[in-house]
Image (cartoon, rainbow, N blue to C red):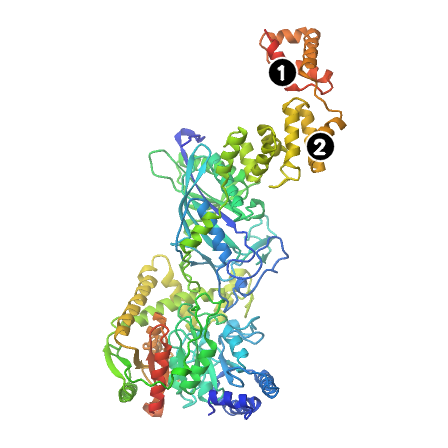
């Protein structure tokens, strides 16, 4: 598989044609996409045009961007001007946004070639892509298994070689968990590092865009391009993009690596074994392993499933069939709203809208949403204490390797537990990434999660790079 | 507190007002679309205004500054604040929530003074966004229920608003009218809004309850659709009497929202508390807390113009008019007090200057075309009885039409000259001789007879004798 950095080097020097790179990726899509279903839409024609433009620019001696000729896939919840953006929901089917998300603008400016829009759990609500209205994505390592979710299409696209990199969004683990299950690198940056302008909101205070790549250096390169302050996003951090590639070879000698001694139970032994191997690898590289406690971590899943649905219930109220997306005609206005939302939203989305509406309602707010906000503060305090003693924290990304289709669809709680290790990061607004670290049961990939404090991306990438080198 | 309640049987009126004003910004509260009234429908729109998926709000700094001006002019404390989402479904609310301020508003704890040193507390003045404008067609009421179809103009959606909430300190409908008028005057003076009630850039919701002094306040009803200062008074007068009638008839007042119908002069139930939406307020996650730093607050305070109450006081001292009277209020609200001062500085008669400006300069704005020295000259002509007050009014019209000019020349062109006092006195004596009956009645204390005498003398002088001079002479001659 071609690395992103090799494509950029080749295309920029003229030794590699962007058009040829795109054709190779389109050929792999042609061979396996019908089996995998990573994409809701492949924009092959536009990709060819864009690649040809990059080649022309190189030939003409023009300066090309930091992602020149790199085929990139976008999760189908990021707005692309004039190109259908569905969130894998029937309610948005056919909607062509009149504007580009900020990340899309940045990718285009950097010379990336957009290959298409990838599948997801409807409105990013799920951990397997089984909640997509357009059918699930298959795990390229074993098509009887899920790719994880919600950004399953983006993870599978990189894993299957359909794109050199992709973007996903992570609200409770939706980048890191599918990255782990598909054996690729996935990064959830610090909240506010990457602009959310043009990302269709699920839970605004938790959502963050980040990259999928096949290795750590590619992830650092791509994240440097898409991050940085955006005046269109009020929650965007007002400072320049962090320098990441430069620190990848610094090693971890003397760094303190946190081991959580009160991690929630339920993690499979094959995954825990790989986590231990990761601690060993870092210790061998000169890092110091430090025991830490995160007492509030046991409440995070519950808090998340109040906060995220509460925000979602508000964010999704605008889908009424009037100004965009699908409409189901009915006798009067209220019936039209009801019929449109009944037909347009899937079961999981409806479940979360109901949960969130309830959690915010008069008389229940204090007991549910209000309590959840307290947990959010508590876990932030726990992390703050932990990061006095340690530079990064290592945990499993997912409690298990990729599971079989249908094995959790009848039990929402079992599905929610997939995110037990990833959710605390979102609640705290911190960065975290999943790095492939060998295989577990049935030779399926296992990911190790590296967590850091706010804007601790450099420490996080140093450790991730060391883990990758140790393999 | 002035006590002018007109309610029967000792009932006391309690009123609080919630006034929404659209801010005079160039762009909307959270996006770059124009904030302009009267444009072609749905032309000032963008992804943020329409609530398109993925769009995010960005605070308009000018809106914050105008809101701070309002707060500071109302003696509020300006504080760090946050934004919340108020969630409800309505066709003219594109995101299905309104971004507003909830438990931490920008401005709190202010007050506004009414004539007679009545102090009305201001609970808060917070920022929020306006909705789109719905127009309902078909049906009789012009409301959504029973209409055939509705059209929505999103030009107004996202226009910055400040909602000014008074404490329930208002005790009469007259005070309520004064409050709205004074607030409007302040908004105009600080340039925060054009405050046109007829265009909806200033809208009042009126909370009305009644109680007997010494007992807790009664249940309140909120009245919407009150679109003029006059309607504020009428709606309160109607609603308070309705409530008294209900209570005295053995009924109880339900907490509800009522609709004021200006045509029938009545309020009707719009929705009861039980039907009220649960707005599910929560902190707007797409915005960060707004923390205006002290230097910004200080700069806005320092740049505030002199406020209407202080300007009326100055005008009153300069011209000898009542600071709480109609002349001072109107002239200051129009921003013409500086002009009056210029007329006085040019040697004009102060009192006449105010009255002329109040009566004849309604269309002139803050900087009338007539040069201050010309108006000054006219007031002097009249004061010195060179022209009669009737002639002065004609000359004032000439002056406004011409945009200024030599008043003395205008007077002689029209053949205006007031007779001097000795000439008028001769005419007065002649009239007493000619109308002995009327004179005798006047001497016997029948004041009505004076009018007939004055009228006869003015007629015989062909308008050249000043009515005031004639009256003074007749009074002096009465034994």
Disc ID at residue B471: 1
**Residue A20 vertical placement versus A375 (above, below):** below
* Image quadrant in which the C terminus of chain A is located: bottom left
Name the residue that disc number 2 marks. Answer: B406
- Nearest to the observer: residue B132 or residue B191: B191
Location of residue B120 in the rendering, given as x and y in whole percent from the top left corner: 42, 39
Q: Is residue A262 above or below residue A368?
A: below
Query: Are dots 2 and 1 in contact, CB under 8 Å?
Result: no
**Chain for mark 2?**
B
Question: Residue B335, relative to residue A5: is it above or below?
Answer: above
Residue A218: image quadrant is bottom left
Tally of numbered discs: 2
Residue at x 54%, y 30% (from the top left corner) = B319
Quarter of the image for residue A381 reads bottom left
Q: Nearer the viewer, residue B452 or B269?
A: B452
Q: Chain of mark 1?
A: B
User: Is disc 2 placed on a helix, strand or loop?
Assistant: loop
In the depicted structure, whether residue B360 falls above or below residue A287 = above
Q: Nearer the viewer, residue A402 or A259?
A: A259
> Where residue A348 appears, x then y in whole percent?
41, 73
Q: CA distance from mark 2 to mark 1?
A: 30 Å
Q: Which circle's residue, 2 or 1, is located before the other in the chain?
A: 2
User: Which dot, 2 or 1, sits closer to the camera?
Assistant: 2
Residue A194 numbered tag: none
Q: Is residue A75 visible?
A: yes
Q: Position of residue B399 (x, y in %)?
A: 69, 34
Q: Name the secondary structure under disc 1.
A: helix
For residue A338, side relative to residue A437 (left or right): right
Image position of B332 (left or right of B406): left
Where is residue A186? Give x, y as percent: 40, 82
Label 2 neighbourhood size at 10 Å, few (<14), some (14-19), many (20+)? few
């Amino acid at each position: 598989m071609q690395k992103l950095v090799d494509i950029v080097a080749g295309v920029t020097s003229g030794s590699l044609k962007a058009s040829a790179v795109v054709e190779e990726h389109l050929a792999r899509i042609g061979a396996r996409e019908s089996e995998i279903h990573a994409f809701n839409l492949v924009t092959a024609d536009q990709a060819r045009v864009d690649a040809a433009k990059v080649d022309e620019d190189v030939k003409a001696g023009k300066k090309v961007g930091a992602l020149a000729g790199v085929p990139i896939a976008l999760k189908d919840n990021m707005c692309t001007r004039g190109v259908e953006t569905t969130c894998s929901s029937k309610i948005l089917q056919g909607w062509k946004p009149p504007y580009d998300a900020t990340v899309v603008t940045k990718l285009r400016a950097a010379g990336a070639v957009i290959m298409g829009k990838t599948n997801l759990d409807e409105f990013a609500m799920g951990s397997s892509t089984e909640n997509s209205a357009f059918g699930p994505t298959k795990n390229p390592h074993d098509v009887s298994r899920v790719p994880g979710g919600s950004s399953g299409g983006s993870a599978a696209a990189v894993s299957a070689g359909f794109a050199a990199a992709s973007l996903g969004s992570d609200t409770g683990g939706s980048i890191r968990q599918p990255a782990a299950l598909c054996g690729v690198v996935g990064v959830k940056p610090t909240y506010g590092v990457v602009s959310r302008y043009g990302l269709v909101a699920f839970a605004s205070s938790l959502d963050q865009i980040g990259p999928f790549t096949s290795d750590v250096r590619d992830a650092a390169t791509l994240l440097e391009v898409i991050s940085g302050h955006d005046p269109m996003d009020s929650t965007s951090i007002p400072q320049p993009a962090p320098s990441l590639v430069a620190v990848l070879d610094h090693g971890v000698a003397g760094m303190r690596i946190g081991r959580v001694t009160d991690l929630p139970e339920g993690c499979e032994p094959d995954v825990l074994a790989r986590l231990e191997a990761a601690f060993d690898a870092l210790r061998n590289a000169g890092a110091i392993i430090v025991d830490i406690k995160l007492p509030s971590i046991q409440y995070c899943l519950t808090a998340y499933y109040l906060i995220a649905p509460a925000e979602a219930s508000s964010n999704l109220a605008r889908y009424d069939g009037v100004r965009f997306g699908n409409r189901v005609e009915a006798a009067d206005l209220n019936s039209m709203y009801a019929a449109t939302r009944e037909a347009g939203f899937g079961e999981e989305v409806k479940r979360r809208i109901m949960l969130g509406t309830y959690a915010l309602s008069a008389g229940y707010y204090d007991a549910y949403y209000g309590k959840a906000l307290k947990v959010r503060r508590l876990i932030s305090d726990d992390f703050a204490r932990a990061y006095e003693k340690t530079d990064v924290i290592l945990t499993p990304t997912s409690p298990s390797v990729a599971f079989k289709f249908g094995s959790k669809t009848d039990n929402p709680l079992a599905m929610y537990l997939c995110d037990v290790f990833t959710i605390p990061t979102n609640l705290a607004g911190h960065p975290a990434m999943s790095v492939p670290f060998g295989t577990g049961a049935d030779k399926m990939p296992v990911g190790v999660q590296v967590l850091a404090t706010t804007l601790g991306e450099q420490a996080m990438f140093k450790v991730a790079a060391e883990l990758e080198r140790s393999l | 507190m002035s006590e002018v309640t007109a309610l029967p049987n000792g009932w006391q009126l309690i009123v609080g007002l919630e006034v929404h004003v659209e801010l005079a910004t160039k762009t909307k509260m959270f996006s770059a679309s124009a904030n302009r009234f009267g444009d072609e429908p749905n032309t000032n729109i963008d992804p943020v205004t329409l609530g398109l998926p993925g769009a995010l709000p960005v605070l308009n700094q000018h809106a914050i500054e105008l809101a701070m001006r309002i707060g500071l002019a109302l003696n509020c404390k300006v504080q760090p604040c946050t934004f919340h989402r108020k969630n409800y479904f309505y066709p003219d609310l594109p995101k299905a929530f309104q971004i507003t301020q909830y438990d931490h508003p920008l401005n709190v704890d202010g007050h506004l003074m009414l004539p007679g040193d009545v102090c009305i507390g201001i609970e808060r003045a917070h920022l929020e966004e306006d909705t789109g404008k719905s127009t309902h067609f078909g049906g009789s009421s012009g409301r959504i229920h029973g209409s055939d179809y509705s059209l929505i103009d999103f030009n107004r959606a996202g226009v910055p608003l400040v909602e000014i909430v008074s404490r329930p300190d208002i005790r009469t409908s007259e005070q309520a009218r004064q409050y709205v008028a004074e607030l409007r005057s302040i908004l105009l003076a600080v340039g925060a809004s054009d405050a046109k009630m007829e265009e909806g850039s200033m809208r009042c919701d009126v909370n009305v309850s009644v109680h007997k002094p010494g007992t807790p306040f009664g249940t309140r009803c909120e009245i919407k659709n009150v679109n003029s200062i006059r309607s504020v008074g009428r709606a309160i007068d109607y609603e308070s009497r309705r409530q008294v009638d209900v209570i005295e008839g053995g009924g109880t007042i339900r907490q509800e929202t009522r609709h004021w119908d200006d045509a029938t002069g009545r309020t009707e139930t719009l929705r009861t508390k039980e039907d009220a939406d649960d707005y599910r307020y929560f902190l707007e996650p797409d915005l960060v807390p707004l923390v205006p730093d002290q230097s910004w607050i200080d700069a806005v305070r320092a740049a505030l113009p002199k406020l209407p109450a202080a300007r009326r006081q100055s005008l009153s001292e300069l011209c000898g008019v009542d600071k709480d009277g109609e002349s001072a209020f109107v002239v200051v609200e129009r921003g013409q007090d500086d002009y009056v001062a210029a007329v006085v500085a040019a040697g004009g008669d102060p009192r006449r200057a105010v009255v002329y400006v109040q009566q004849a300069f309604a269309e002139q704005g803050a900087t009338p075309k007539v040069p201050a020295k010309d108006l000054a000259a006219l007031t002097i002509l009249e004061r010195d009885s060179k022209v009669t007050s009737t002639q002065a009014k004609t000359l004032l019209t000439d002056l406004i039409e011409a945009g200024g000019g030599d008043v003395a020349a205008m007077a002689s062109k029209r053949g205006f000259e007031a007779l001097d006092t000795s000439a008028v006195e001769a005419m007065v004596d002649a009239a007493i001789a000619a109308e002995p009956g009327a004179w005798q009645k006047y001497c016997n204390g029948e004041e009505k007879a004076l009018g007939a005498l004055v009228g006869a003398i003015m007629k015989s002088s062909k308008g050249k004798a000043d009515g005031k001079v004639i009256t003074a002479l007749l009074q002096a001659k009465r034994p």
